[in-house]
Image: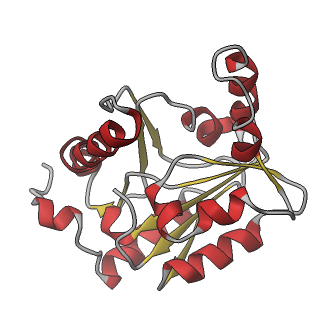
Amino acid sequence: MATNLSHSEFTQLASEQQIEKTAQALQAHGIQAVVMDTGEEARTYVLDLIPDGAEVFDSPSRTLEAIGLAEQIEHANRFQSMRARLSTFDHVTQRNEMRKLIAGPDVLVGSVHAITEQGEVLIASAVGSQLGPAAFGAGQVIWVVGTHKLVPTLEDGLRRIREHSLPLENERSQQVYGQPSAINKILIINGEAYPNRITIVLVKQQLGF
């Protein structure tokens, strides 16, 4: 039975015990987990993880925006920002080429919507551009996640997406794109087969939805 979480608990930072339990579960499932106190520390850590010359795709993320990582990636000289490159493409005539580029970056950087204490990682998307690279296409995946996104169970994680993340993303989408958002696709990662492919940086701050 799922734990009954209130909306205030969807924004409440996890306890040290819950963070430790979740990090251990992620490690047991082949996912590297590190814990940082601040977004600034996480930003420095992530930038250090990105290899020189890599093609980096940062998926749309309020978390990356909040800690200044999206801007750092876009204007980096040490590696290549795929988002900066894609901004020069025509979204109608070059859509197929854009899709192929996004599908297999060297490094995917972003965030997720929930992580369970059993080490399950949940990401929802209206379009799904970040889901393929996250599941397999990207050579390296780095997610920055505020610890308010840690939940007890998978059912709690799905409910967090429906009841908390979607309304906030829907409001943002209306403001930015003039259209509503939707939960069209959900990726649940139970583990990673390739060592060191996925790193999750847990940050003890409220970051993103």
Q: Position of residue 184 (x, y in %)?
A: 37, 26
Position of the C terminus, as image quadrant, is bottom left
Would residue 12 appear left or right of 127 to someone viewing this image? left
- Image point (26%, 43%), residue name: 171
Is residue 159 placed above or below 23 in the rendered structure? above
Colour pattern of the rendering: secondary structure
Q: Which of 24 and 92 is in front in this view?
A: 92
Would residue 44 appear left or right of 184 to someone viewing this image? right
Residue most extreme to the top: 93
Which of the 4 image quarters holds residue 34?
bottom right
- Image point (60%, 32%), residue name: 132
Residue 157, visible in the rendered structure: yes
Residue most extreme to the right: 53
Would residue 85 appear left or right of 10 to someone viewing this image? right
- Image point (52%, 71%), residue name: 67
Is residue 192 placed above or below 44 in the rendered structure? above
Which of the 4 image quarters holds residue 137?
top right
Would residue 15 appear left or right of 90 to someone viewing this image? left
Residue 196, visible in the rendered structure: no
Is residue 121 placed above or below 151 in the rendered structure? above
Q: Which of 49 and 126 is in front in this view?
A: 126
Q: How many marks?
A: 0
Q: Where is residue 167 in the image (x, y as percent from the top left)?
A: 22, 44
Q: Where is residue 147 in the image (x, y as percent from the top left)?
A: 37, 71
Q: Where is residue 55 in the image (x, y as percent from the top left)?
A: 81, 48
- Image point (63%, 62%), residue name: 71
